[in-house]
Amino acid sequence: MNIRCYASSGGVVLHDGRVLLVRKKERPEVRLPKGHIEPGESRAAAARREVAEETGYAHLEVLADLGSLEVEFEFNGERVRRNESFFLMALKDPTPQPRKAEEEARFEVFWADPEEAESLLTFESEREFLRRGLRRGIERVG
């Protein structure tokens, strides 16, 4: 079986003690905002772009690199290996910008308390990045 490999990057965005999440409308999934890293794009730049595209929150400050994990899964009969990177982010401006129609159609954006967020997230890798982000966020504040 062929394995499709790619890299993605996203953000654990914290604001006023809450975590930014997206609910996929076409599948029953709750996720941290993330997406493909484009050729020539840095992991951090991809994370900022993907969070802004999916959520409308474009004024982001990257606070910490939360590292990477490799996940492997089957999707539509294809084996996929994805290197996922996440960054801890804060909003410099909490006013969302208008999103493209396709992003509006794909994602419902919402904020959740950290404990609720961890229980809502569909995938363990994203729960791990949330835990890393919360630990780093507490270190920055404390």
Image (spheres, rainbow, N blue to C red):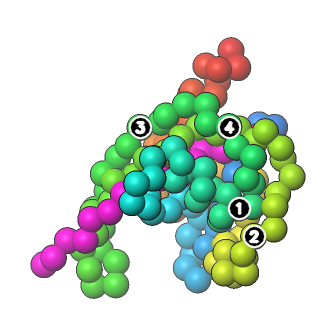
On screen, residue 33 versus residue 60, left or right, reads left
Q: CA distance from mark 4 to mark 3?
A: 17 Å
Give, as a three-letter code, the residue at label 4: Glu
Using the rendered view, name the quadrant where residue 23 is placed: bottom right
Residue 84 in picture, x, y percent from top left: 40, 52
Q: For the residue carrying disc 1, how many other residues have a C-alpha within 10 Å: few (<14), some (14-19), or many (20+)? A: many
Q: CA distance from mark 4 to mark 2?
A: 19 Å
Q: Is residue 11 magenta?
A: yes
Q: Which residue is mark 3?
A: 67
Residue 31 located left or right of residue 66: right
Give the structural element (helix, strand or loop) at label 3. Answer: strand
User: Which element type, helix, strand or loop, lies under badge 4?
Assistant: strand
Image quadrant containing the C terminus: top right
Circle 4 is placed at which residue position? 61
Q: Which residues are magenta?
A: 1-15
Horizontal side, residue 87 vs residue 72: left or right: right
User: Which residue is the site of mark 1?
Assistant: 55
For marks 4 and 2 on the same chain, the one whose residue lies earlier in the sequence: 4
Q: Earlier in the sequence, mark 4 or mark 3?
A: 4
**Sequence-first disc among 4 and 1:** 1
